[in-house]
């Protein structure tokens, strides 16, 4: 692969790292100031909601620090023990951020329950109202900026931090509403509001933690990514079909991919070799995805008998409920052997039963042939299941 291409992607990764760190530092500075202001106002006004809001800001500071550390760890060069690099460290830091948020929510809930049992009368001042109002505006601006940047550079940590900041603005708005209600009607909703805030924080933490664990477990690649890879491979005129795509996620924007392509059986080994190399380069240039393996299915459109049998077998397979695709057909008249693959939906109650039904129907139609049918797994989410 060209050194210019590799250098270009290395430059993109460095730019992404700088963007994440810069955004995280902005978040740290903003949250430190907000936390300090809210802590002072909350203590002076005896407002548990404002104090909890201040604690939540400090948890945001910790989240930003963890994001910076995770980004640095993820950019470590591959080594003997980790030949695919350390990109998944970003998922681990996202998990830590989710745990921090979850812990902050649980702690806040405990304190709020204590205040419900033994309430204190809040004492709001004009300064408190102004500071909370400013905090709302700052959090909206900060959350929008961080979340948008996170989506642009594909950083779950930044997206989580931005989402948390936007949620904080809603929480601060609720605190402001409680203060206004108390000043007008002298009804204190502090402790109850603190409990509601805590539940929202806990729910957010659980959602973020679940999403990050899903990444670490190995979730499906997005439909958009799978479609782009298929389109890239199909852009070569020799390729008639792309199947069995398997993706391995080694961190944000760090995908490896393998699969099958269907090409004419007239291509020589040299031509297939050159085709595979060209596809690998094009896939890396367009999408930064490393092609680790590419197997080949062949087809013959000059033999009318083979075309007819292939068409009939595909029709039989697709007539069975829950079959999404049939591909990889090969007919060996000399050995009297038929080979093909099928993909069965995960929605099928019994995928093996679907497979047996397909084999039974094809065997009934072609009893004189030895049949080899492979049950494939659709790792990349076929368009039929969108």
Image (spheres, rainbow, N blue to C red):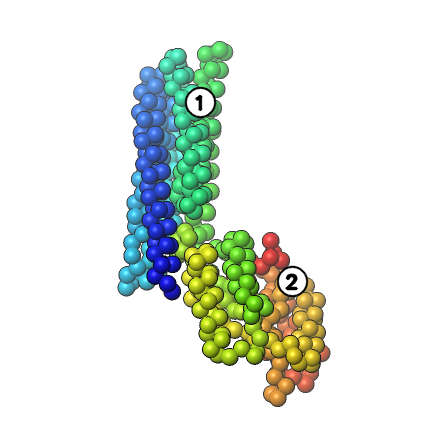
Which mark is drawn over residue 165?
none
Residue bearing the label numbered 2 = 322
Q: Nearer the viewer, residue 348 or 289?
A: 289
* Distance CA(mark 2)–CA(mark 1): 52 Å
**Image quarter of the N terminus:** bottom left
- The answer to whether residue 295 shows anywhere in this view is yes
Name the residue at 31% across, 29% down: 32
Decide: is 135 above or below 237: above
Residue at coordinates 62% horizontally, 78% vertically from top-left? 300
Secondary structure, mark 2, is: loop
Indicate which disc residue 175 carries. 1
Secondary structure of residue under mark 1: helix
209 vs 223, nearest the viewer: 223
Residue 200 in percent (x, y) is at 47, 33
* Image location (x, y in percent) of residue 204: 45, 38
Vertical position of residue 223 compared to residue 378: above or below: above
- Determine the image quadrant of residue 64: top left
Q: Position of residue 267 (x, y in %)?
A: 53, 77
């Amino acid at each position: 692969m060209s050194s210019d291409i590799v250098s270009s992607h290395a430059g993109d990764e460095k730019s992404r790292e700088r963007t994440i760190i810069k955004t995280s530092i902005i978040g740290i500075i903003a949250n430190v100031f907000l936390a300090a202001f809210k802590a002072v106002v909350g203590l002076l006004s005896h407002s548990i909601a404002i104090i909890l809001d201040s604690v939540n800001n400090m948890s945001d500071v910790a989240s930003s620090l963890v994001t910076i550390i995770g980004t640095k760890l993820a950019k470590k060069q591959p080594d003997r023990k980790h030949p695919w690099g350390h990109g998944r460290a970003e998922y681990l830091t996202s998990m830590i951020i989710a745990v921090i948020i979850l812990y902050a929510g649980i702690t806040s809930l405990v304190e709020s329950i204590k205040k419900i049992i033994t309430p204190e009368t809040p004492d709001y001042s004009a300064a408190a109202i102004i500071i909370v109002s400013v905090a709302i505006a700052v959090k909206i601006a900060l959350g929008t900026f961080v979340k948008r940047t996170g989506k642009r550079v594909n950083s779950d940590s930044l997206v989580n931090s931005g989402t948390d900041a936007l949620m904080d603005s809603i929480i601060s708005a609720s605190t402001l509403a409680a203060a206004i209600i108390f000043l007008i009607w002298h009804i204190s909703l502090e402790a109850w509001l603190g409990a509601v805030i805590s539940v929202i924080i806990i729910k957010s933490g659980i959602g973020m933690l679940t999403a990050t664990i899903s990444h670490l477990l190995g979730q499906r690649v997005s439909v958009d990514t799978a479609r782009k890879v298929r389109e890239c491979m199909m852009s070569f005129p020799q390729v008639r079909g792309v199947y069995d795509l398997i993706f391995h996620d080694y961190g944000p924007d760090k995908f490896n991919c393998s699969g099958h392509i269907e090409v004419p059986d007239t291509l020589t080994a040299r031509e297939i070799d050159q085709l595979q190399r060209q596809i690998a380069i094009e896939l890396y240039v367009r999408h930064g995805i490393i092609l680790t393996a590419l197997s080949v299915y062949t087809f013959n459109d000059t033999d009318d008998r083979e075309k007819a049998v292939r068409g009939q077998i595909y029709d039989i397979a697709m007539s069975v409920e829950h079959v999404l695709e049939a591909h990889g057909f090969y007919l060996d008249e000399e050995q009297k052997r038929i080979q093909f693959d099928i993909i069965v939906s995960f929605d099928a109650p019994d995928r093996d039963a679907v497979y047996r039904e397909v084999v039974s129907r094809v065997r009934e139609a072609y009893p004189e042939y030895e049949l080899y049918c492979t049950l494939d797994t659709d790792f990349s989410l076929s368009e039929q299941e969108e």
